[in-house]
Amino acid sequence: MLCMILSSEYDSISELKKLLNIGCKIQDVQPPFIASDAETNIVIVTIVCPDGKKHTIKAFRDESRALREFVRGHV
């Protein structure tokens, strides 16, 4: 019997939540919201933390749409 555990959340969203919880801020989202309400296959989010470190989160296909909606609710 094949058992599959499905995460209720994509890894990119979990990572972004973790960074936001420690005080990091979303600096940039590509492609921009205005330019891409159409179908997107990739979303790149740049985050800056209080210590000055930058993080980049990339998501593809269905995950990119979920990440985009999550970011839209937090910007």
Image (spheres, rainbow, N blue to C red):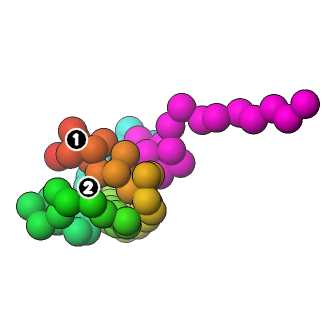
- Left or right side of 2 for 62: left
Pointer 2 local density, CA inside 10 Å: few below 14, some 14–19, many at least 20: some
Q: Where 1 falls versus 62 (above or below)? A: above
Q: Position of residue 69 (x, y in %)?
A: 27, 44
Q: What residue type is labelled 1?
A: His
Label located before the other in sequence (2 or 1): 2
Q: Mark 2 points at which residue?
A: 26
The residue closer to the viewer here, 61 or 19, is 61
Q: Position of residue 34 (x, y in %)?
A: 9, 61
- Mark 2 secondary-structure assignment: strand
Boundaries of the magenta span = 1-17
Q: Where 32 falls versus 13 (above or below)? A: below
Pointer 1 local density, CA inside 10 Å: few below 14, some 14–19, many at least 20: few
Q: Where 43 falls versus 6 (above or below)? A: below
Does the stretch in magenta take in 14?
yes
The quarter of the rendered structure image containing the N terminus is: top right
- Mark 1 secondary-structure assignment: loop
Query: Which residue appears at 43% of the width and 59% of the height?
Result: 61
Q: Can residue 26 be seen in this view?
A: yes
Q: Which amino acid does label 2 sit on?
A: Ile
Does the stretch in magenta take in 15?
yes
Q: Do the residues labelled 2 and 1 touch (CB within 8 Å)?
A: yes
Q: Mark 1 points at which residue?
A: 74
